[in-house]
Image (cartoon, helix red, strand yellow):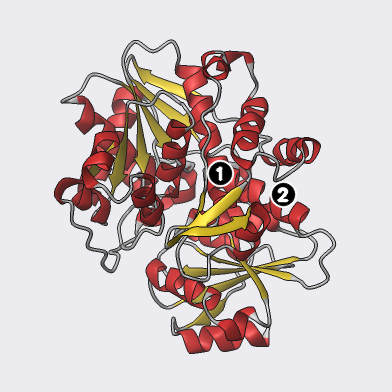
Amino acid sequence: MQLYSTNNHNLRVSFREAVMKGLPDDNGLFMPVEIPALPGRFIRELKKYSFQEISFTVAKNLLQDAIPDPDLKNIIRNAIDFPAPLVRLDDDTYILELFHGPSLAFKDFGARFMAQTMSWLNRGEDQELTILVATSGDTGGAVAAGFHRTPGIRVVILYPSGKVSPLQEKQLTTLGHNITALEMEGTFDDCQALVKAAFLDANVTDKLRLSSANSINIARLIPQSFYYFEAYKQVTPLPSPLVFSVPSGNFGNLTAGLFARKMGLPVHQFVAATNANDVIPEYLETGKYHPRPSVRTLSNAMDVGAPSNFTRMLDLYCSTWNMMREDVVGFSFSDEETREAMQEADKRHNYVLDPHGTVGYLALRKYQKQNVCTGVVLETAHPAKFAEDVEIILGRKIVIPERLATLANKEKTAVRMKPDYASFKEWLLRH
């Protein structure tokens, strides 16, 4: 497998270099030189295969010979060891539950695959590898769980103070060992900017082996395409065109869906569902991209004002607005609309959505008013991760899974820091 930079299509690097570096030196993002189509027979016969078998075939198709088959199978077996079940709400609406992994969020798929892959790529190295990751909520917990106690790798997680839920914060601040949390007095965009700055700073990269576990890293993105195939397997035969509604912040999840479509998955359209941070729906409507500081919302993990993976989306469509609009439509919703939709889903379908999945549910409902389709909403996190808000909105208690409940009494350990690069760089080099 070879990859190029979105800022330099003539660049060629190996899968190993792309994963271990995280970002190209030119501040672009790595993209596969080729996204081969899977055999049509494989897609038609998906019901014959287990989720792990599907994941291996999709990964092999993308990675080609970057990882030997026995090792890739072992990586998949250790990483994708939990299901992605599809739940029917009505004849044309389904929920793809992506929260059955250890941190109860969809990012477990990417984080666990990435941890296994990096551990394999890192074998034989003498110098410790430092993973830098910015999180608006779920990424931090998933990465912390995925990389916890991985030999030869330490993880530094940057998160915005006061802008993640209490249980999300406990997931990334209570593990210790090789996991360190930096509590930044700013926004997610500030955290992401600091991570990118470190990768582009030769004074840092000369002294530390750095890589990233955000969806800017191609190893995080690839496994997110697996569950689109798993969803298709469960929803077929289709009575109408298939549409995925994707709650979106940094847009890695939707980009992975576009990868799946390019590999041959018969998806009619994607719905980019956002909260008030609506720069992508605005672009899809007007053709103008105006990144701006994020605003805080009920669906906090989607509070992103400058989504990194939009660069990859543009690259897939050769920066052609009209081409992207054929495959992707976008809608944004307020917190009040989100609250009302959570109550509706609970009363109408007896289904408890988290705030992020609710935005996806709203977007699908809006799309279906004008289009006949079979819609799948990606439910990205267990509602218990946002229990305080969900219980107030629904007016009742919800069940908290034991793995979350046990976090409540654990002691938080985090380094509080202002989001200026000089302070972050000094800390990073000193530690």
Going from N to C along the chain, the mark reached first, 2 or 1, is 2
Q: Nearer the viewer, residue 409 or 163?
A: 163
Res. 209 image quadrant? bottom right
Residue type at mark 1? Ile
Where residue 283 appears, as percent x and y from the top left, is 21, 52
Tell me the SS state at disc 1. helix
Report the quarter where the C terminus lies. bottom right
Q: Is 36 placed left or right of 326 in the picture?
A: right
Numbered tag placed on residue 132 in the rendering: none
Q: Which residue is mark 1?
A: 222
Where residue 170 appears, as percent x and y from the top left, is 57, 61
Which residue does the image show at 40% across and 59% down from the upper left? 308
Res. 247 image quadrant? top left
User: Dot 2: few (<14), some (14–19), or many (≥20) neighbours within 10 Å?
Assistant: many
Q: Gap between marks 2 and 1, in whole Å? A: 13 Å
Tell me the SS state at disc 2. helix
Q: Is 338 placed left or right of 112 in the picture?
A: left
Q: Nearer the viewer, residue 127 or 292?
A: 127
Which residue does the image show at 75% across and 55% down from the upper left? 121
Residue type at mark 2? Gln
Where residue 235 appears, as percent x and y from the top left, is 45, 17
Residue at the far front in the pictured view: 10
Q: Which residue is mark 2?
A: 116
